């Protein structure tokens, strides 16, 4: 009785029945599990937002505090390692799911008219996801965070014309430090989430407005003769979400999230490697040397992104499954294989044995260095080339000069 | 009829899985956020100075510092107390934090009372509430004297 009363109260004030009818609209007849990937991406976005919002309770975006705060979360706060694990591995899952979702759309050429705008906003969301990844892994302020960001920002600096300006804006100055960390944190936790949810809103609006594309097997008559979105599709989606969550939770519980030593801008022995989803770009950069550097850092990524963004206007062929479109099949296969091979090559590329060994082979010690080595006993790990004067020594030197 | 039954099953199962997911993610997240409330504070003895120098039949304001773990930071905390000794070895050290809403009380020698600047609370020299809204007396800190040094227990 009470439930009926509440229902009536809400029905009188909100268009709940219209919403119910809308949610129960039939889907195309031919549809499969791949059509749950978008919902899984949405689920991951919400999970990332929730875990991120909670992680922020214990995080401080300053070089003095960030690493200690992350250590504190991982080692001392109850559920801290689990929550951080969900967020960290959730980011990787997000990249995988979003790329699979994109490939599903390519497979069934769902980006074709009238769904071009849905596609464009989807590609923009892919960029946002990569932006989350890039801004997110600076936050622990460990060696990986620091050096991957150094390289990332340097890549941006090679853009013609405004490159240097863009890099300075990204860093908040000429080098990575407190201002960089602060603005990456702001981007990661305020700007990108707002943008992401805004774009998701538009993307979802288009998805609902044009309806699910279904597979190309659907005849025009079959587009509205399938099962209703709610509860049938939603049921499949939540089962997928449950499976994904169980996998993520297991990984978060049993695979510790790496946290390297605190960022050290003078550590020449560190071999910077980005997160796995940027390894293809990392590897690509090795093939373009000297004046051709810009091809790897700017031309290929920019052209690639623009082609992806405007794919619906480039591929004007009839809608069909991928294997019935030889050109699309070839291009997609080449891109996927290329990215996978580059990722594997990047991940397995040999690291330098030691940076010092390379230095000794290529340069002779200076007279000053030899002198130091002969006269002072240097302990392992001590700063060998530290000739910096103390304030007293500077004062003494000034007094002698006078 | 059969179709409706299946739909209803799907709706209930969907809601159930949604609930399971919310709980599975929600419980650790809430636990993560509220865990400081269950953390027991570490108590430690902090020295206020030489007992002889602090001996005074009137209340003396003493500020002191000590280091304590504040999350991931080893922080220097500042505290302020009123100290007096009754002459028979009994020390009275009152926290200056008003038991009402946390403002710092001041000792008024002429009125022989602790006055709170916020909501008009007044405590007598034993820390008991004379007037105003506080529900409890001023907090009296545990003390000890060792090797002539007065210590208070910080928690």
Image (tube, coloured by chain):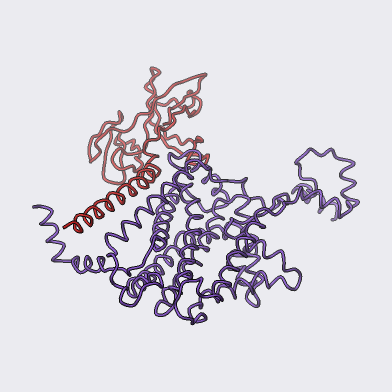
Chain colours: A purple, B red
- Identify the residue at image location x=49%, y=55%: A91
Measuring from the top left, give residue A210's x and y in whole percent.
34, 75
Q: Is residue B63 above or below residue A90?
A: above
Measuring from the top left, give residue A132's x and y in whole percent.
50, 61
* Left or right relative to A350: residue B8: left
Residue A282: name its quadrant: bottom right
Q: In this view, does B148 lie above or below A229?
A: above
Residue A77: name its quadrant: top left
Residue furthest toward the top? B88
- Identify the residue at image location x=23%, y=55%: B6
Measuring from the top left, give residue A220's x and y in whole percent.
33, 77
Nearest the viewer among A109 and B148 is A109
* Left or right relative to A18: residue A84: right
Measuring from the top left, give residue B56's x and y in whole percent.
42, 26
In what quadrant of the picture does the C terminus of chain A appear?
bottom right
Residue furthest toward the left? A1
* Left or right relative to A71: residue A157: right
Q: In this view, does A68 lie above or below A8?
A: above
Nearest the viewer among A2 and A378 is A2
Count of all numbered marks drawn on residues in the image = 0
Nearest the viewer among A367 and B12 is B12
* Left or right relative to A355: residue A250: left
Nearest the viewer among B145 and B38 is B38
């Amino acid at each position: 009785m009470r439930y009926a009363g509440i229902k009536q109260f809400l029905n009188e004030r909100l268009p709940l029945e219209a919403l119910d009818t809308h949610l129960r609209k039939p889907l195309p007849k031919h549809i499969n599990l791949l059509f749950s990937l978008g919902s899984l991406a949405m689920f991951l976005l919400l999970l990332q937002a929730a875990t991120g919002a909670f992680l922020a309770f214990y995080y401080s975006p300053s070089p003095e505090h960030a690493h200690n705060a992350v250590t504190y979360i991982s080692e001392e706060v109850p559920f801290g390692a689990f929550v951080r694990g969900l967020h960290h591995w959730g980011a990787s899952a997000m990249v995988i799911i979003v790329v699979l979702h994109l490939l599903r759309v390519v497979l069934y050429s769902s980006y074709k008219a009238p769904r071009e705008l849905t596609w464009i906003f989807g590609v923009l969301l892919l960029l946002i996801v990569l932006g989350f990844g890039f801004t997110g892994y600076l936050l622990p302020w460990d060696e990986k965070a620091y050096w991957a960001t150094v390289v990332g920002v340097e890549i941006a600096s090679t853009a013609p014309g405004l490159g240097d300006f863009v890099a300075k804006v990204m860093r908040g100055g000429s080098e990575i430090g407190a201002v960089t960390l602060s603005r990456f944190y702001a981007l990661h936790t305020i700007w990108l989430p707002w943008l992401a949810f805004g774009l998701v809103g538009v993307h979802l609006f288009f998805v609902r407005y044009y309806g699910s594309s279904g597979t190309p097997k659907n005849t025009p008559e079959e587009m509205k003769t399938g099962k209703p979105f709610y509860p049938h599709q939603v049921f499949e989606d939540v089962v997928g979400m449950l499976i994904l969550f169980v996998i993520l939770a297991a990984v978060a519980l049993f695979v510790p999230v790496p946290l390297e030593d605190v960022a050290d801008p003078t550590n020449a022995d560190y071999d910077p490697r980005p997160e796995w989803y940027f390894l293809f770009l990392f590897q690509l950069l090795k093939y373009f040397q000297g004046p051709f550097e810009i091809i790897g850092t700017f031309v290929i990524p920019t052209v690639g992104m623009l082609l992806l963004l405007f794919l619906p206007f480039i591929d004007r062929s009839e809608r069909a499954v991928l294997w019935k479109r030889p050109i699309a099949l070839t291009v997609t296969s080449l891109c996927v294989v290329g990215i996978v091979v580059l990722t594997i090559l990047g991940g397995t590329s040999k690291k330098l044995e030691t940076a010092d060994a390379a230095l000794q082979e290529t340069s002779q010690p200076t007279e000053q260095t030899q002198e130091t080595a002969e006269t002072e006993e240097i302990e392992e790990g001590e700063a060998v080339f530290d000739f910096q004067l103390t304030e007293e020594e500077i004062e003494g030197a000034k007094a002698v000069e006078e | 009829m059969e179709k409706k039954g299946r739909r209803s099953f799907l709706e209930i199962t969907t809601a159930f899985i949604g609930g399971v997911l919310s709980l599975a993610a929600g419980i650790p997240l809430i636990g993560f956020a509220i865990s400081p409330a269950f953390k027991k504070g570490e108590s430690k003895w902090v020295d206020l100075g030489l007992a002889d120098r602090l001996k005074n039949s009137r209340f003396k304001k003493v500020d002191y510092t000590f280091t304590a773990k504040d999350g991931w930071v080893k922080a220097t905390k500042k505290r302020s107390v009123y100290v007096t000794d009754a002459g028979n070895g009994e020390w009275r050290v009152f926290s200056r934090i008003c038991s009402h809403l946390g403002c710092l009380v001041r000792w008024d020698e002429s009125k022989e009372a602790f006055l709170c600047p916020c909501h008009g609370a007044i405590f007598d020299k034993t820390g008991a509430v004379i007037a105003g809204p506080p529900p409890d007396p001023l907090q009296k800190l545990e003390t000890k004297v060792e090797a002539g040094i007065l210590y208070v227990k910080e928690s």
